[in-house]
DNA sequence: GCCAACGTTGGC
DNA sequence: GCCAACGTTGGC
């Protein structure tokens, strides 16, 4: 199983909206960046991801699971763009903001820190566990 | 709201 | 195929 990070502006698509979709989940559409798309192509059902609020909040608020592999993005006819479906798993009891991440030695190499603009990013297992621990999740 | 960083586009 | 110009993103 691999780990990822999905970034969204809460004003466009928020954690609460994702949670409201329940187990049916929702497609992670609207990605128009090759690197991000390529990451989604690598995803498999059962992979886990963090849900990150960009812009004003700048914090990891919950975890998600990939429930469908890459398929055409329904919001465009342009066949270059694909997306996966994800569902919300659980909120972080303590959301982890960007400042906290930057202060952690173990998280200094996160893509979120190194390339903040990439909207779908890989996360290492070590980073995943570290953030779960910080956020109060034992299931990570 | 500003601006740096990055990705994409299009002229040559 | 290079690179300048432009648009977008997201941290600050």
Image (cartoon, coloured by chain):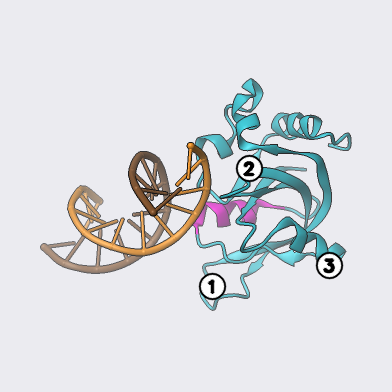
Chain colours: A cyan, B brown, C orange
**Looking at the image, residue A7 lies above or below residue A74:** above
Distance, label 2 to label 1, CA atoms, is 23 Å
**Looking at the image, residue A112 lies above or below residue A65:** above
Q: Label 2 lies in what chain?
A: A
Q: Nearer the viewer, mark 1 or mark 3?
A: 3
**Looking at the image, residue A119 lies above or below residue A78:** above
Q: Which residue is disc 2 drawn over?
A: A122
Q: Which mark is residue A107?
A: none
Q: Earlier in the sequence, mark 2 or mark 1?
A: 1
The magenta segment is A33-43
Distance, label 3 to label 2, CA atoms, is 23 Å
The image quadrant where one finds the C terminus of chain A is top right
Question: Does the magenta-highlighted stretch encompass residue A37?
Answer: yes
- Crowdedness of circle 3 by 10 Å Cα count: few (<14), some, many (20+)? some
Q: Which residue is disc 1 drawn over?
A: A79
- Disc 1, SS: loop
Q: Which mark is residue A24?
A: 3
Q: Position of residue C4 (x, y in %)?
A: 18, 53
Residue name at image x 59 percent, y 33 percent:
A110
**Looking at the image, residue A42 lies above or below residue A80:** above
Q: Earlier in the sequence, mark 3 or mark 2?
A: 3
Q: Label 1 lies in what chain?
A: A
Q: Foreground: A74 or A57?
A: A57
Q: Main secondary structure of the magenta part?
A: helix
- Disc 3, SS: helix
Q: Earlier in the sequence, mark 1 or mark 3?
A: 3
Q: Nearer the viewer, mark 3 or mark 2?
A: 3
Residue name at image x 52 percent, y 68 percent:
A80
């Amino acid at each position: 199983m691999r780990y990822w990070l999905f970034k969204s502006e809460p004003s466009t698509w928020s954690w609460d909206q994702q949670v409201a979709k329940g187990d049916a989940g929702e497609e992670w559409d609207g990605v128009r960046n090759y690197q991000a798309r390529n990451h989604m192509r690598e995803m498999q059902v059962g992979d886990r991801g963090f849900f990150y609020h960009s812009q004003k909040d700048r914090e990891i608020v919950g975890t998600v699971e990939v429930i469908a592999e890459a398929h055409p993005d329904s919001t465009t006819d342009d066949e270059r763009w694909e997306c996966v479906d994800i569902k919300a798993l659980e909120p972080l009891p303590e959301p982890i903001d960007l400042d906290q991440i930057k202060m952690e030695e173990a998280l200094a190499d996160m893509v979120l820190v190194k390339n903040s603009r990439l909207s779908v990013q890989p996360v290492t297992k070590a980073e995943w566990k570290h953030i779960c621990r910080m956020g109060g999740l034992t299931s990570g």
